[in-house]
Image (tube, rainbow, N blue to C red):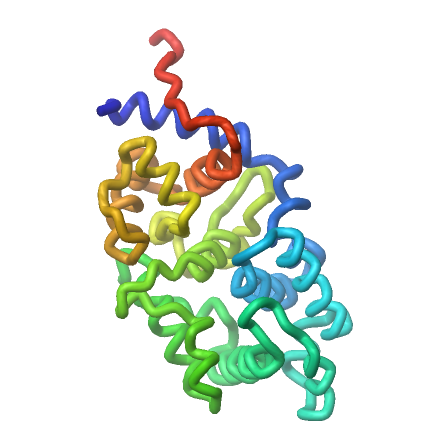
């Protein structure tokens, strides 16, 4: 078992290695990085995060295609598109995220802007220790508009045990104040300390190899277990380590913790 200082030194080094602007171009976060207006960024980010599973080239291609179908003005499209305008999505498919799901998301996002003023407000729960209840609240807001039952699977529910990886990742993008400008940090009411680890097969595998996750299932209990370890390493910004752990997950070489530390 490695000491907390050894883990922190190693993960800090990996964070510095992977958290750089070059990371943007090969990641779904490149989709919202094409925009400058806050609302465009958060809407493009939500769609990009929602589609962020499967082949990365397909994720990027379909994310860019979806933004093109919105005339590269996602906020304007969301707020003003008519039923006829939304026919442009008729043939859109990204794995199980299909045209009906896109239309549902647009209507749900529009509802949130009209009733809460911003997407950020839909995730904000006063005095919440983590973003878990914010995710649940956002999901409830989205599902308050008419939708097909099949669309519910694109909005994970941590209250039902889901790791909610894509929404945790989306919140990292929006909330973290990142000196390297990979994450946007454009939301102010949520704090980086409240974020939870975006846990999937890859980050779970690396975390278990490092000995910082014991639970075998990639569920919300595992998210809480892993996040608690990362919060002990950096209480103010624990999910910066997602970038380090994910970066190691896409490497083909075996994971090896380097214990050498600078002399004190």
Q: In this image, 138 relative to 186: left or right? A: left
Residue at image point 57% right, 51% down: 184
Figure label count: 0
Camera-nearest residue between 56 and 236: 56
Vertical order, 98 against 226 (above or below): below
Vertical order, 67 against 91 (above or below): above
Q: Please state the horizontal and vertical placement of residue 207, each as a whole percent of the image.
A: 34, 38
Quarter holding the C terminus is top left
Q: In this image, 4 relative to 57: left or right? A: left
Image quadrant in which you'd find residue 54: bottom right
Camera-nearest residue between 1 and 15: 1
Residue at image point 54% right, 71% down: 96
Camera-nearest residue between 48 and 172: 48
Q: Please state the horizontal and vertical placement of residue 241, each as a whole percent of the image.
A: 42, 38
Q: Residue furthest top?
A: 263
Q: Please state the horizontal and vertical placement of residue 116, each as a whole percent of the image.
A: 46, 79
Vertical order, 140 against 180 (above or below): below
Residue at image point 33% right, 33% down: 209
Quarter holding the N terminus is top left
Residue at image point 46% right, 59% down: 166
Camera-nearest residue between 122 and 212: 212
Q: Please state the horizontal and vertical placement of residue 42, each as a whole percent of the image.
A: 57, 64
């Amino acid at each position: 078992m490695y000491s907390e200082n050894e883990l922190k030194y190693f993960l800090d080094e990996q964070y510095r290695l992977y958290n750089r602007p070059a990371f943007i171009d090969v990641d779904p976060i490149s989709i919202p990085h094409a925009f400058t207006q806050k609302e465009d960024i958060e809407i493009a980010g939500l769609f990009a995060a929602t589609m962020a599973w499967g082949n990365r080239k397909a994720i990027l291609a379909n994310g860019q295609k979806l933004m093109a179908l919105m005339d590269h003005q996602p906020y304007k499209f969301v707020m003003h598109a008519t039923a006829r305008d939304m026919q442009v999505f008729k043939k859109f498919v990204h794995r199980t995220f299909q045209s009906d799901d896109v239309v549902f998301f647009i209507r749900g996002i529009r509802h949130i802007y009209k009733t809460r003023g911003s997407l950020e407000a839909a995730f904000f729960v006063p005095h919440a220790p983590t973003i878990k209840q914010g995710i649940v609240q956002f999901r409830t807001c989205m599902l308050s508009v008419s939708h097909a039952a099949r669309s519910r699977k694109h909005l994970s529910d941590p209250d039902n045990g889901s790791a909610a990886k894509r929404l945790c990742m989306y919140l990292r993008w929006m909330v973290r104040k990142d000196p390297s400008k990979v994450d946007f940090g454009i939301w102010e009411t949520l704090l980086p300390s409240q974020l939870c680890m975006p846990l999937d097969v890859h980050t779970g595998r690396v975390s278990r190899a490092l000995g910082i996750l014991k639970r075998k299932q990639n569920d919300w209990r595992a998210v809480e277990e892993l996040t608690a370890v990362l919060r002990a390493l950096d209480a103010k910004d624990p999910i910066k380590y997602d970038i380090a752990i994910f970066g190691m997950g896409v490497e083909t070489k075996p994971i090896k913790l380097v214990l050498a530390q600078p002399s004190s």
